[in-house]
Image (cartoon, rainbow, N blue to C red):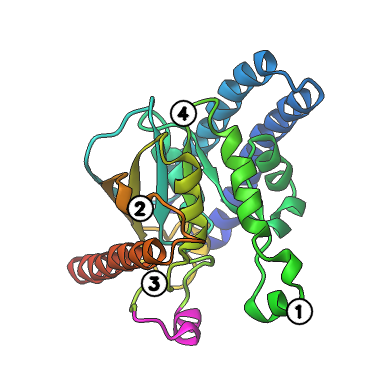
Amino acid sequence: MFSVLPSFIVYPLHLTLQMLSLAFWAINIILLGFIKFLLPFSFVSKPINIVLNFMMCAFGFCSVTLIKLMNKVEFDYVVDGQLSQQEWYLIISNHLSWLDIILLTDFAAGKIPAPKFFLKKELIWLPFVGLGAWALDMPFMQRYNKAFLQKNPHLRGKDIATTKKSCEKFRQLPTTVINFVEGNRFTPEKQKLKQGPFTNLLPPKAGGIAFTLATMGELFTSVLDVTVIYPDTKGSPMHAMLSGRLRKVIVRVHVHPVTDEIVGDYFNDECFKQGFQNWLNSVWHNKDKLISKLKETN
């Protein structure tokens, strides 16, 4: 509808509407989160969590509705497998933009349980987003590089402890746990710096999802391998979306069963660790080939 307008008009209008939507849903989510914090009883938290999950999906729906109004965009979604709102899922996805989070939240609505994202600890200070994520019981992760851990060995494994604590909360209701296993948003510069074997991806980090599977393996029905690309977009997809220049979004979802091959003691069983890394690298190589193919055909 508004995509015919010039970008210098669309951008501030679209940004304002997206921020108002975010603020509206975040304020309501945060208020319920404080009630849940002050009354930490299961008979209170369980119904509140149901409402919170609904609100999160409603935010995704409203945001994508605005995207459609401001962009002449085509959504190409294909799911290879069966999905249910009554099951637990672990999503492993590539990561290109903040826009990925909005799209995956909207994708979940009506198909799978509301998603929970693993977030960087610094995001707790982001207006609306930080406290909203806290209210939704999303885990905030503090990442340390190898050099820092060598100087501070007592912090080794702290991320894993955070994962375990967060996953215990996810047992109350069917949940979708989303992990961007690259640990960062993909850019060509980061890809060159990492010097990984992938053309369109950063190397995956196995520890977090291995521990999540070990902690909740008996609950997870499937691992959803999600691939997101913006084939007609150069530069930032978020900037293109706000400017009314987003033309196509492609999402591919492949359903993997949760088997003994991917549930085990990643940190103490060296044989399992090697096998899990081989499995994840195989998934990532297939994803890399799929992205190249989708880019060629689009």
User: Which of the marked residues, 4 or 1, is nearer the chain's N terminus?
Assistant: 1
Q: Give the range drawn in magenta.
A: 188-197
What is the residue that sits farthest to the right in this orientation? Answer: 38
The picture places residue 284, in percent across and down from the top left corner, at 32, 66
Query: Image quadrant of residue 34?
Result: top right
Give the residue at x 28% y 66%.
282
Instruction: Give the distance between the C-alpha atoms of the residues marked 4 and 2, in whole angstroms.
Output: 20 Å
Q: Mark 3 points at which residue?
A: 201
User: Which of the marked residues, 1 or 2, is nearer the chain's N terminus?
Assistant: 1
Residue placed most toward the observer, 257 or 79: 257
Q: Do the residues labelled 1 and 2 touch (CB within 8 Å)?
A: no
Q: Do the residues labelled 4 and 3 touch (CB within 8 Å)?
A: no
Mark 4 vs mark 1: in front: 1
Q: Mark 2 points at which residue?
A: 262
Magenta stretch prevailing secondary structure: helix
Compared with residue 1, is residue 274 higher up or lower down, i.e. above or below?
A: below
What amino acid is found at the position of numbered circle 2 in the picture? Ile
The picture places residue 123, in percent across and down from the top left corner, at 70, 55
Mark 1 vs mark 3: in front: 1
Residue 95, label in figure: none
Q: Do the residues labelled 1 and 3 touch (CB within 8 Å)?
A: no
Residue 174, label in figure: 4
Q: In which quadrant of the rendered image does the N terminus lie?
A: top left
Q: Mark 1 points at which residue?
A: 151
What amino acid is found at the position of numbered circle 4 in the picture? Pro
Badge 2 local density, few (<14 within 10 Å), some, or many (20+)? many
Badge 3 local density, few (<14 within 10 Å), some, or many (20+)? many
Mark 2 vs mark 3: in front: 2
User: Which of the marked residues, 4 or 3, is nearer the chain's N terminus?
Assistant: 4
